[in-house]
Image (tube, rainbow, N blue to C red):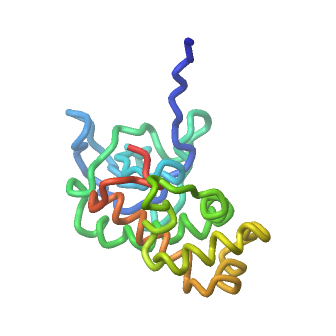
Amino acid sequence: MERAQTRKYEEYAYVLDFVVRGKSTTVRGRDGIIVTALGEERLTILELLAMPNSTFEIGERVYIGKEGRTKILSVLGRLEFNQISSSAQSELASVVEKIVTHNEQRFVDYLNNAQPLTPRIHALELIPGIGKTYMKTMLEEREKRKFSDFKDLQERVGLKEPAKQIAKRIIEEITGETRMNLFVRK
């Protein structure tokens, strides 16, 4: 069975940090405005080369897709958490939370469809704040009716701030504290 390998590219990324006169850490000899950003879809840390004279704000959502970029010249490569500046590291939490809230439906769908990973561990349990009790309630509730949004989940299950809990999990995955990734694609 042959399957064409289609590489999935990020369309958008959120700025974590940028250096106006920077040097790339992923591509030798590339310098200019170097932007550290987090991809919206795959949640990987990316190094971007910006167009000259572009300005950025921390947390800004920039288009990095194939056609019609306005601020980004090229995606230079992927970075590991320990390769990014401390200011980028400290912005990570708020940027991840922004992505989770901006893409609420995607994460609610995940919670509506999450399955057991092994006979003893359910994917839901890997999200901070969700233990066996919340998990059981969530599974019972989603049997009756899928969750429509975070508010619905919070009201029916009692789980406080689901967006924050999911963001916490994503950060654990980005920083490499977890063995299994639910959200971050390597």
Q: Position of residue 27 (x, y in %)?
A: 25, 34
- Residue closest to the eye, 176 or 142: 142
Quadrant in which residue 17 is drawn: bottom left
Q: Specify the quadrant that holds the C terminus.
A: top left
| Image quadrant containing the N terminus | top right
Against 30, residue 88 (above or below) is below
Count every numbered label the image shows and give the total.
0
Residue 183, visible in the rendered structure: no
Q: Residue furthest top?
A: 2
Left or right of 8, for residue 145: right
The image position of residue 98, as x and y in percent, is 53, 70
Asked whether 91 or 49 is in front, the reply is 91
Tell me which residue sits at (22%, 45%) in the image. 23
Between 132 and 95, the one lying in front of the other is 132
On the question of residue 8 being in view, the answer is yes
Q: Is residue 119 above or below residue 146?
A: above
- Residue 90 picture quarter: bottom left
Say whether residue 48 is left or right of residue 110: left
Residue furthest toward the right?
145
Occupied quadrant, residue 32: top left
Relative side of 82 to 181, left or right? left
| Residue under the point 42% across and 63% down | 170
Residue 78 percent location from the top left of the image: 33, 43
The residue lying at 47 percent from left, 53 percent from top is 117
166 or 113: nearer the eye?
113
Percent position of residue 158, x then y: 61, 87
